[in-house]
Amino acid sequence: MSENLQAAALSGSGGHERLSKSSLLRHSLVILFPVVGTLVALGLWWSGLAVPTAVDFLLLGVFYVLNILGMELAYHRYFTHRSFRAPRAVELALAVLGSLSYVGPIIWWVAIHRIHHKNTDQQGDPHSPWWPQHPGRLRRLYHAHVGWLLDARCARPEQWGRYAMDLYKDPVLFKFHMMYDYWLVLGLAIPAAIGGLLHGSLQGVLLGFLWGGTVRVFLATNAIWSVNSVGHALGGRSPLETRDHSRNSFWQAIVTLGAGWHNNHHTFPSYAVTSLRWWQVDLTGLLIRALAFFRLTRDVHMPNTASVEAKKKKPLATT
């Protein structure tokens, strides 16, 4: 994001600010790399040159879950909304998990998401499919899903002070942020190394890199981005008062470990859980409560009956 983002978020200016050619190339490569890797993985499987085994699908599943938790548990519920507290060692572990998840540097991500909550589905929201910065609904959905990553105002936040000063002032977290390129590479190298060890071959390194790395990133990032796009356009609404277009979606809640109860989250963003009913599955929320049981988290913000009742839509008065 450029220095104009904060002003745009506050003033509601629209439009699309172009990245420089070098930044556009870099960001496009980061976005397209998992796509290309996934196509290569499928092509090698189809051709019989590198057929994935149960080991590779296990790597895909394990690293997918870790990827989603890096975003939803670490970046989102902890660092952005501070929905619970954690000892310093746990906090740094969460910072590592988030930094390895291929969704962006920690301070940038937190700043963007806090701006999103400040201006949800209004001008100034970095990734909304509603306000008319682009003509046509499909183009708006594209922008909310991934196009916003190529908007200069959303690509290099230079005014972190207003939205993420708590992280900006932390020298360790700031270093994590500045080292993001290394985390990005490490997040792909770890499954490759494990694949090589488990298979005992160079082909195992390739399979681990492709299935535990690029395919996993492709699936996880699109699941996460779908909450920004589809999660503000399709799905159900809770009987609670909100001033945005956020939606609840069971299938999104499954693939994002709870983030799909997005309307619930926008109603109560500081809650550590997104489930407000017994049948709403929120695996991230369950994990937070499990960590609290073992005293690895504390001060967990949970729903209370009074707050939920106060947010319920009031029936129209009749005469």
Image (tube, rainbow, N blue to C red):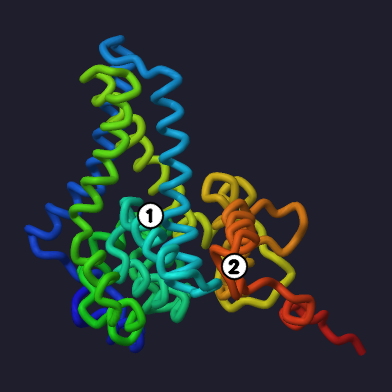
Is 248 left, or right, of 13 in this rendering? Answer: right
Residue 238 at x, y percent in the picture: 70, 66
Residue at the (45%, 81%) spot, across then down: 118
Disc 2 packing (10 Å; few <14; some 14–19; many ≥20): many
Is 295 left, or right, of 185 in this rendering? Answer: right
The residue where tag 1 is placed is 97
Local SS, label 2: loop
Residue 139 at x, y percent in the picture: 36, 57
Rendered position, 42 above or below 161: above
Is the C terminus in the top left, top right, bottom left or bottom right quadrant?
bottom right
Disc 1 packing (10 Å; few <14; some 14–19; many ≥20): many
Is 96 left, or right, of 302 in this rendering? Answer: left
Indicate which disc residue 46 carries.
Answer: none
The reply to whether residue 42 is in sight is: yes
Res 51 → quadrant: top left
Local SS, label 1: helix
Rendered position, 281 above or below 217: below
Residue at the (44%, 46%) spot, across then down: 66
Is the N terminus in the top left, top right, bottom left or bottom right quadrant?
bottom left
Name the front one of labels 1 and 2: 1
Residues 210 and 299: in front is 299
The residue where tag 2 is placed is 272
Name the residue furthest right: 319
